[in-house]
Amino acid sequence: MKQLLAITDPGCAASTRYRVMQFENSFRHRGVRMQAVPCPREDQEVARLLETVRQADVVVIQRFLPRAALLRQIRKHARRLVYDFDDAVIYHESTHQKPALRLRRWWRFRRLMLCCDAVTAGNPYLADLAGIHADRPRVFTVPTVVDVEKYDREPAPPASPLALGWIGGRWTMPYLEQLRGLLEQLSAKHPGLMVKIIADQSPDLGTVPTSLVQWSEPTEVRDLKTLGAGLAPLPDDAWTRGKCGLRLLQYLAAGIPAVAAPVGTQAEIIRHGGVLPAASDKEWQAAIHKLLTDKPAATDLVKRGKEIVREHYSLATWSPRLFEIWCP
């Protein structure tokens, strides 16, 4: 059996889970055993990593950008080297500052693009960033996907039609907080409206009633299915255009009607239909109001949303393609 080693960023567990480990069973059935290890911090860890690299048939660097010296050693010993990423890693995150170019990260990114045998990027914007430095035949767009069958297997508990919802980590919570003013207005118009947060902490939404559900991998699908509608806000900037739409895909797979900003992969999903777009406060208010008051429209969105995920963003659809790219 062949060996695939994924070197991952320990600070990005969701990327590791969705871009690497959820393909483990599929790869095993095709004769490849997958192992994931965090990027090394100490010299001793580097030595152990390089020994594992020597034994692997394929090495995938997932999202993190190694220093030049480490990259040279990995490249020297790797039979096939792939880079996979689902964020605009050369820019500052835009949650707290302008997404300026990070020169050190850009240099590391450029070196990786020049020496990898293949690059898998989470959306066309990221593929274009890679294509500046890598030959385009080595760059492939592979979207972040979800296991549709897992969502279908989970029974749907009673959902509250007035429970708007959001799932994510604290680092993206400022995007949700930017909706505070319009959510306060909507909650005044719709008595009983609340926002359910599936995360590790609550956002500051002012006077809007909120409920925090601690995120847990075993319960996230069940928790998602209790929502009446999903929110996926994003500003439009150099960082967020690299976002790969996981939050929105989770809503659609769970059968939740959603409103989303047309940015990054979310814009692609919106173009397929099945999601209400919103780029301004006025559009956000109108779209949320529609989901709260027009049940037939919400039902149609749910049906189309599930079709979109199954056709374009499912684990079953993309597993064979990713295997062809990583393990030709």
Image: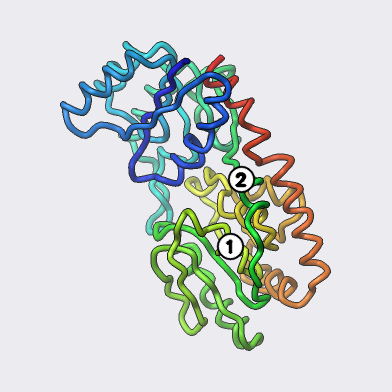
- Label 2 with label 1: CB-CB less than 8 Å: no
Q: Is residue 10 left or right of residue 315?
A: left
Q: Distance between the residues labelled 2 and 1?
A: 20 Å
Where residue 224 is drawn, which disc sits there? 1
- In the structure shown, which secondary structural element does the residue marked by tag 2 occupy? helix
Of the image marks 2 and 1, the number of the one nearer the N terminus: 1
With respect to residue 220, does 74 lie above or below?
Answer: above
Q: In this view, does 233 lie to the left or right of 77?
A: right
Q: Residue at x 40, y 57 (%)?
A: 171
With respect to residue 248, does 58 lie above or below?
Answer: above
The residue lying toward the viewer, choosing from 55 and 290, is 55
The residue lying toward the viewer, choosing from 148 and 265, is 148
Q: Residue at x 51, y 61 (%)?
A: 167
Q: Where is residue 289 in the image (x, y as percent from the top left)?
A: 71, 75
Q: Position of residue 95 (x, y in %)?
A: 42, 57
Q: Residue at x 17, y 32 (%)?
A: 42
Q: What residue type is labelled 2?
A: Thr
Q: Position of residue 140 (x, y in %)?
A: 58, 26
Crowding around mark 1 (Cα neighbors within 10 Å: few <14, some 14 to 19, many 20+) is: many
Q: Which amino acid does label 1 sit on?
A: Leu
Residue at image mark 2: 265
Q: Residue at x 44, y 27 (%)?
A: 34
